[in-house]
Image (cartoon, rainbow, N blue to C red):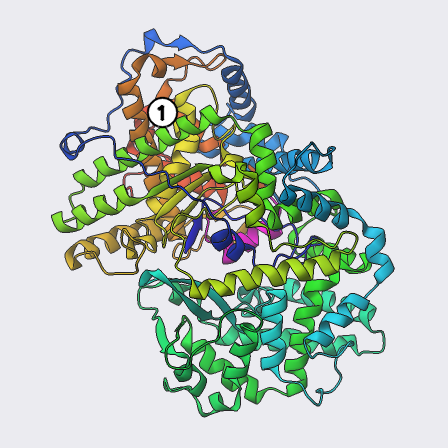
Amino acid sequence: MKYKVKDIDAESHHSSKLPDSNLEEKLERAVRCSTILIGALGVSLIALAVYTTVLVLTDYKTLKPCLSEECVGTASRILQALNKDVDPCTDFYEYACGGWIKKNPVPDWATSWDQLARLREQLVTDLRELLEEDDEEELPASVQKAKALYRTCVDVDKLEKDGIKPIENILATLNLPPRPPTEVSANFSWEQSAGLGRRLLGLNVLISVQVAEDVRNTSRNRAVIEQVSPGFSERYLLRPEQFSHEIEQYHHYIKQMISIADPATDAEEFAGHIVEFSKSLAKIMTPVEVRRSGTHLFHEVSVQQLIQGSSGGPVQWKEHDWQKYLELVFSNTNVSLHAQQDRVIVMDLPYLQKLAVLLSDTKPVIVERFLWWSVFSTVAPMTLASFRELGFEFSKAVFGLQQRTPRWKSCTANVNANFGVALSYLYVRRHFDQDSRKKAIEMVEDVRAAFAAAVQQLGWMDSSTRARTLAKLQAIRNFVGFPAWLLAHQDLDKHYRHAEIVEGNLFETYLKLTAAAVKKSLEALREKPDRNRWVATATTVNAFYSATLNSVTFPAGILQPPFYGNGIEAINYGSIGAIMGHEVTHGFDDQGRRYDSDGNLKQWWSAATLEHYHGKVQCIIDQYSKYHMPQLPNYTVHGFNTQGENIADNGGLRAALNAYSLFAKRQPSAARVSLPGVSHLKPEQLFFLGFAQIWCGNSTVGALKSKLVEGVHSPNKIRVIGTLSNSKEFADAWKCPKGSPMNPEHKCVLW
């Protein structure tokens, strides 16, 4: 289980970039490192017990102006982002971000635009330059592969020349007809097509099969089987009246794609079959609310028990060849599943049981059509431009995208997804300051110490749970910047030794890269989990907490302004410090708190403490459930589904503020500084301003609707308003009257 500080926005539902079917899996499991950065708390428990959260900056007359290049740039960003016509105690987000919002509309080629998106845009531009520049001497072979993939990807003329023949070939390999089936094929079986699709394309259709740590014993890997989305938002599919526009556009997209693939097919009927079967799949899925709850059960069974359906399944279970499906998933690997000895973790048993019934009750031709469409829609964008154009038109109608993503940009992102570590080699040498890494580690340790101090003062936690909480906190490992091994040519090339590029043939390259990546991930079943691995490459603008690894990761990509390197520590701790606190707090949110210090799913809380915890979490759920955005007045934030991120935002801000206090005590002169143009703002005010301004953003109505309906993060504005209105320190710093919008009487405080 991995948490991100923010979802990575998809530019379109069906992107024109090379599909990377196992990106999460590759990032989580394939990026390896040989060392761990283990931080000590830095303060003793005795010191923590007496630690106070009051800022030590008392003499504001002694503030010294910071006139460095970084500070001047930071001051300029702050001033341009402000809307001084708004009372900060009425709407701090509008006060902090109103100017930014006005000056930064969503670009035509995006559906949302904020500080993270801007950094990602700059990152992609930097990576493009690195990919296109002349090769230097003795460049690692893996980097040369990355450059070859980029050259192949941007050659769209080659894609047009080959037409849809590559699609027909892969369909035949998966035992599917070259054209949309009008009647069920004589030798069709969903088990064969879905099993081979998973193995060769990394495509999870109907069922998801992954290899991951056993969450109850993270020292070993297990095959994990769970439900999978039908290819379009199940939330939308389950509410056809409310989301009629989105469903109609999906139907239209399918119809247009089929009309190009085979004009002889009744495209209207085909699209209707896909949409209706997708709705049927959505209806049997375990709701996200149930999956998130503590009552959601994991079922561990032997392979034989799974095949035979001996766990109380329906009679239709035995109508399906589960053994054949699993054998094909693991075909051409070093794994042969043993019927009795190998154990499988089933995450969504009710879904699998209902799926067995649905597949038996559905006309075979419709099932075959669904599998055919799942494969076709995945690979079609790598062929004709007309398919990519339809994907853009769909995103335009549903998410408000106004302009197609330039080919160089989607290809750069594609290379980063497949060769992220190789690109990191180029990126960190050119764009990352090693000294900043040391400071970032120091900040993480300040955040950890501040969080520990807060735990010591919690009145609702008993001593035994407190001791375990502090032990887990101390066990969190820091991964900052990039893994050192990537600078060693030999290690880097070893990492990509199985990656093969067929220069000039994008489709064949995709097949080879995907098959190799899937093989590597599946063969991990027989390996011991790498506890030292990074969950993201350095070329990632995001931050992560891994519950099973109990680690936090802050890649080089996010360690830059406005998140980091702002020249003034009040801003740094308010921005990247709050993100660091956010990730640390994830270890103790409604999901992360279920895992112990070794990443094992275990009940380590006392019943009495859990009761208090749930009450405080419910306060946050209720608070956020009342928020809505003016663009969509009939939609509210889903307080239950966003609770983990909201807990992390609130706890992270509090930990960051107290971490800044630690820094100020340690280096008082460095803390007593002001910024030009905003010298009237005290350091603690700048801290909160730094926090708010990292979330300045705009969004299309379609993208905002998607976030509200199915996202795990609250909209950016709510992340600021909700978090700061729970902070007494914020109200004190900005002198907000009690009862004002930003200083309500009742505050939700957990960590």
Q: Where 584 sits versus 299, above or below?
A: above
Q: Where 511 sits versus 315, above or below?
A: above
Q: Which residues are magenta?
A: 699-714
Amino acid carrying label 1: it is Trp
Q: Which residue is mark 1?
A: 734
**Residue 54: percent from left, percent from top:** 24, 25
Residue drawn at (57%, 65%) of the image: 236
Which quarter of the image is occupied by the N terminus? bottom left
**Residue 738: percent from left, percent from top:** 29, 32
Residue drawn at (63%, 54%) of the image: 499
Residue 318 on the magenta segment: no
Q: Dot 1, crowdedness within 10 Å: few (<14), some or many (≥20)? A: some
Q: Is residue 153 visible?
A: yes
Residue drawn at (71%, 78%) of the image: 176
Q: Is residue 696 visible?
A: no
Q: Secondary structure at mark 1?
A: helix
